[in-house]
Image (cartoon, rainbow, N blue to C red):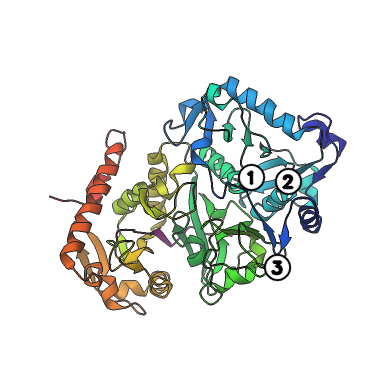
Amino acid sequence: MSDIKGSLGLENVGTVFRNSSIDFLIDFAVKNEGAKISSTGALMIDTGIFTGRSPKDKFFVNQDPSNKYIAWGDINKKVSKEVYEDLLKTSKKQLSNKDVFVTDVYCGSSLDSRRAVRFITEVAWQAHFIQNMFIMPTKEELENFKPDFTIFNACKTVDMAYVSHGLHSEVYVIFNVEQNQAIIGGTWYAGEMKKGVFSMMNYWLPLEDKLPMHCSANIGKDGDTALFFGLSGTGKTTLSTDPNRALIGDDEHGWDDNGVFNFEGGCYAKVINLDKDSEPEIFNAIRKGAILENVVADENGVVDYNDKSKTENTRVSYSIDHIENHTPSMRGGHPKNIIFLCADAFGVLPPVAKLDKQQAMYYFLSGYTAKVAGTERGITEPIATFSSCFGEAFLPLNPTVYAELLGKKIDEHNVNVYLVNTGWTGGPYGVGKRMSIKNTRACINAILDGSINDSEFQNMTIFNLQIPKTLKGVDTHVLTPRYTWSNPLEYDKAKRKLAEMYIENFKKYLTLESEYDFTAAGPRLD
């Protein structure tokens, strides 16, 4: 343990709790951090005023050679090495002179592509979260563990000099690629740690010709792998957690020469309005070892999943072992089907459409969806947005890098690609209603069992999407969105408006060099 102490870069460290048992961390969090136990045995914690990520507070250090690869802009903002060093001192000062929790884990279930990551924090439940979310080393691996990357989570401090540092607020999440470090200050939200590692995997892997993906994945009884892309709230976790298919992972994956592999060892699911009958696998996963974030419970620990008084971004973190039907290796072969999930707040897009390769790359780059209430600070109702590759917030490189890698792999492995709308039907948000899980499940099942190919398809004008006329288990009128609106002419207006938004959004890619002409595959108004 003394060797560990000396390697942390901290002063006068007390006890180092390294990869402590879950029982110990739970007990510590209850006794010292105000955590409580739910009626089903899960740990309940509050993350304070930060109940979602703080994307405006994320920065990369501007230095050679990484600054040649990073796509600088609103997503990847620059900070000087001097500011980083200043805040590194602040972070280390906060973590010094006390007991700390050190959690050593792997990101990536592929031995050819994984990274060893060390997290240092003074909060027990955050250490528990890390153990849930990443892959725990064996005893032997732990003895020889050397981190490829280290995150200092100093959530109890803030940047008092943020104005002079040129930052957005007192909160900071800063990545130093060359030093293989990141620092977090001012926010307790555990998702910053999870997504921080994801951002770094999105930097490293494409440089090795491997595709990192913000998606969930599962595998059928015949060994067919399926990928589900989509932002928080689009149904990624819900739809990939299927009693008939083994879960590979619910959020972040890589695709290398061996196939698809999970970055993580756990799941991080939204629980707002969680219903036992609709999502039994997630509901039953909320037991001892799971962590509930920002939920409301009565004096007996019974959670009211419909209560959004703290946030709509209520979450549960649990080890993938809590899902009975999962793939222990957390790996699968090259995918047979890829599904892009979006929550269309305008009620325009069909529940399912089949895409060719060029369309797949266009809609992947567009990443249209709706940001769902509570996922980020300040979002109180769904807002239509475009997020490149369904994960722009986590892409350090230019989005076309990832799109071209996807196109290459679709060709190499002859993958089918579909667009599935889990958003609104019968009108826009506020008028129409959310697509039923029943209809969405039926669309997904038809894709996975191949029966969708038995359907007769029709062309959706302007968007040039191929949509089935009939589909087993789906209300026929729902398949053609125009039929669900009380005023079809209003639908036509909304469709043109959404098409214009796609076209306008895509203009930012037209000046970039690419061997593909993506625009021809998108909506056309001429």
| Label 2 sits on residue | 123
Seen from the viewer's position, the closer of residues 265 and 311 is 311
> How busy is the neighbourhood of tag 3: few (under 14 within 10 Å), some, or many (20 plus)?
few
State the image coordinates of residue 88 (x, y, percent, origin top left). Answer: 66, 28
- The type of residue carrying mark 2 is Val
| Label 3 sits on residue | 299
Q: Residue at x 25, y 70 (%)?
A: 480
Residue 5 visible in rendering: yes
**Circles 2 and 1: CB distance less than 8 Å?**
yes
Kindly report the distance in space between the C-alpha atoms of the residues bearing marks 3 and 1: 24 Å
- The type of residue carrying mark 3 is Glu
State the image coordinates of residue 437 (x, y, percent, origin top left). Answer: 43, 72
* Range of magenta residues: 333-346
Closer to the chain start, of discs 2 and 3, is 2
State the image coordinates of residue 393 (x, y, percent, origin top left). Answer: 46, 43
User: Where 504 sits versus 447, above or below?
Assistant: above
**Circles 2 and 3: CB distance less than 8 Å?**
no
Kindly report the distance in space between the C-alpha atoms of the residues bearing marks 2 and 3: 24 Å
Foreground label between 3 and 1: 3
Q: Is residue 22 left or right of residue 522?
A: right
| Label 1 sits on residue | 188
State the image coordinates of residue 238 (x, y, percent, origin top left). Answer: 50, 66
User: Where 113 sits versus 496, above or below?
Assistant: above
User: Where 251 sits versus 69, above or below?
Assistant: below
Q: How many marks?
A: 3
Q: Residue at x 30, y 38 (%)?
A: 509
- The type of residue carrying mark 1 is Trp
Seen from the viewer's position, the closer of residues 304 and 336 is 304
Q: Name the quarter where the N terminus is drawn.
A: top right
